[in-house]
Image: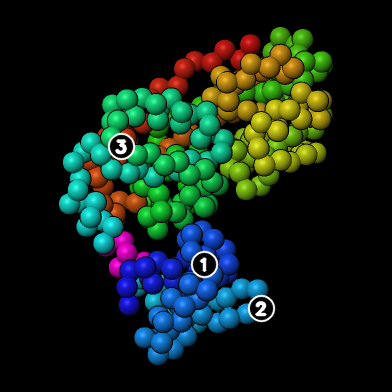
Amino acid sequence: MDLDQLRYFLRVAERQNFTRAAEELGISQPALSRSIQKLEEELGQPVFERKTRSVSLTDAGTLLQGRAQQVLTILEETKAEITDDGQSGRLRVGAIPTIAPYFLPEVLRSFSREFPRASLIVQENTTDALVKSCAQGEVDLAILALPVPSKYLHVEELFEEELLLVLPTDHPLVSQEKIRLGDLEQFPFVLLDEAHCLSDNIVSFCRQRSFQPVAVERTSQLAMVQELVSLSHGVSMIPAMTRQLDHSDRRVYRSIAGRKPKRTIAVVWNPYRFQSRLLKAFRERLRRYRPCHIDPE
């Protein structure tokens, strides 16, 4: 049993499909099948139950999955400790889609100037997926919006961010001096789909004030929310960091009067995994970051 066999086995177990696993591993499907077959011969029993279009783990495969992950993690962390010079190495940074393109570029540029020998890999995904990746060591840290559904990860708050109301330019509320949450009750909302926590932030804020926003359209990208608002499909609430990069004249941003909707940005990591000096330096850079004040006008 060698390390490549364990890596191949884990990828098939994750994808539940030999073809997809082979494509991601960059090897042929016959070669992958032979590797798994050799592994099963060595163990004396199958690790996968083969189906027409997918595979599932047998009891032996389930046991092997946990142990194989432990073995590879120990080897990776041992290598990381030995080679940890505080200047070079690889950092895998996760972020949700409503943060990654707006917050990370400036942070990554600054960090790369200070640590030019470091390699930074960014993974953009939903909160649930990134929490799982953090717990399993697939990413070193993740930048998310609270709440974070995990008691096994360390969560550190970074800053609060206002959610700005976005309207089409011809909307009747544009000329109103102050816009309160109650003024929005009669208007439909455009929101991200339910996999994104931003929608939960918006709906929760409204419900706390006895107001249930009616979502007429949902999409998977924040840029599409902005475009649909521009086309008068509805109104929405957008993170202030997104407003900073929006130079369109087809929509208008307003700060809601009274108590304002906000979200809290946090960094999370697995405290039970090896913490390299490079990783600690990156976290310190995140702590020092302060978002610019955004004029919604």
Q: Secondary structure of the magenta portion, mostly?
A: helix
Q: CA distance from mark 2 to mark 1?
A: 19 Å
**Residue at x 33%, y 69% (from the top left corner):** 3
Badge 2 element: loop
In this picture, is 68 found above or below 59?
Answer: above
**Which image quarter: residue 79?**
bottom left
Q: CA distance from mark 3 to mark 1?
A: 32 Å
**In the image, residue 179 lies at what x, y percent?**
70, 17
Residue hosting label 1: 28
For the point 74% across and 34% down, the residue is 190
Determine which residue is flagged by label 3.
Answer: 118
Q: Residues within 10 Å of mark 1 (few under 14, many from 20)?
A: few
Specify whether 247 is left or right of 142: right
Q: Is residue 4 above or below residue 192?
A: below
Whether residue 203 is visible: no
Tag 1, which secondary structure?
loop
Q: Is residue 120 above or below residue 36?
A: above
In the picture, residue 261 is in which quadrant?
top right
User: Helix, strand, or loop for circle 3?
Assistant: strand
The CA span between labels 2 and 3 is 44 Å
The boundaries of the magenta stretch are 69-74
Do the residues bearing badges 2 and 3 touch, measured as CB atoms within 8 Å? no
Q: Amino acid at mark 2?
A: Thr
Depth order, front residue of 60/266 = 60
Dot label at residue 52:
2
Residue type highlighted by circle 3? Ala
Percent x, y for residue 200?
A: 62, 42
Residue 22: x and y, percent? 52, 65
**152 vs 289, nearest the viewer:** 289
